Amino acid sequence: MFSESTLYIVATPIGHRDDLSARAIDLLRQVDRIYAEDTRHSLPLLRHHGIDTRTWALHEHNEESRIDMVKEHLQTGASAALITDAGTPLISDPGFRLVRACQRDGIRVSPVPGPCAVTAALSVSGLPTDRFQFVGFPPARSGARKTWLQPLAQLPHTLVIYESPHRIVECLADIADIVGDTRPMTLARELTKRFETVLHGTVNEVAAAVSEDSNQQRGEFVLVLGGTSTEDALGGENAPVIDLDKTILVLLQHLPVKTVARCTAELCGVTRKLAYDRALELQRR
């Protein structure tokens, strides 16, 4: 149901233009304004569906300065929609500050759900989806990226990571180094677009496929990474998860650090480097 004085958060296609829902099309035709991350990018989609509503730019660089203008527009009884370049707004895209400001002022905010790269990639990954964590884009530099990956490497549930084409090869190498090259993963590239690719395998296998084919280094990437599940850690679905720090602390009482790292890697399903670095840190404490 369409309502005035409402900010609609509208999901748009992540690739294929016809993935825009009938409800979204109807609503985008009815609202008084559409706030788009990049109006030049969104106009072809809107024209494709016969939507001629006036568009205004709202992106990470001007969002803060536009909040009052948007609120004033909505408080007059008018309506508006927020869209992003692709997918569901606020998922690694602008909009959080605007939505929060509207909610604080009692302005109604309503979702119009639809495409999202996170859920699209999860649905074809073949990895557990009963619990997952979306962690967005990793840091750009390798050192910071490895530090960012270290605590994630110990998590038992599935992880979803976004990455850009000019960093994908290096990112996969860092994942192999920190998380381990045998961890199961799916790489989804250019989802719903002409050159859509979905690669399944271990981190090492996926990294090799991307490194060997320059075509696989183009476009938008979603990485779905298996967690340190009980099956990965101990080879059995019903075995208990072993606590990493507790294991290291017990072994440090009897063994040198290098041996502790080797044993911990085998027991907990993490890389020797991660286990070694963690053992050093715990030993210093």
Image: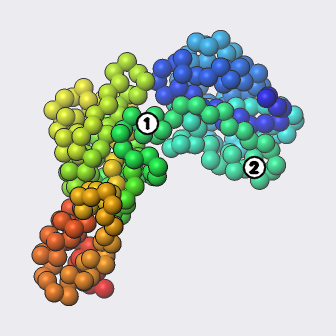
Vertical arrangement, residue 93 with respect to residue 156, above or below: above
**Image coords of residue 72 (percent x, y):** 81, 40
Quadrant of the image for the C terminus?
A: bottom left
- Disc 2: which residue: 103
Q: What element carries label 1?
A: helix
Looking at the image, which is closer to me, 228 or 177? 228
Q: Disc 1 or 2, which lies upstream in sequence?
A: 2
In the orientation shown, which residue stands out farthest toward the right?
A: 76
- Circle 2: residue type: Gln
Q: Which residue is rendered at x = 26% and y = 30% of the image? A: 216
Q: Nearer the viewer, residue 65 or 149?
A: 149
Up/down of 80 relative to 106, above or below: above
Q: What residue type is labelled 1?
A: Ser
Using a 10 Å C-alpha cutoff, classify the residue at mark 1 as few (fewer than 14 neighbours), some (14 to 19) or many (20 or more): few
Q: Quadrant of residue 44?
A: top right
The residue at the far front in this view is 238
Task: Look at 17% across and 76% down and name the residue there.
Answer: 260
In which quadrant is the N terminus drawn?
Answer: top right
Q: Which of 271 and 49 is in front in this view?
A: 271
Q: Element type at marker 2?
A: helix
Residue beneath the point at 74% across and 41% down: 109
The residue singled out by tag 1 in the image is 123
Q: Is residue 77 above or below residue 248?
A: above
Measure how far apart labels 1 and 2 are at the Cα level.
Answer: 32 Å
- Percent position (x, y) of residue 214? 21, 28
Residue 26 position, x and y percent, is 71, 20
Front disc: 1 or 2: 1
Label 2: how many residues lie within 10 Å, few (<14), some (14-19) or many (20+)? few
Q: Residue, x 31% and y 76% (percent of image)?
A: 245
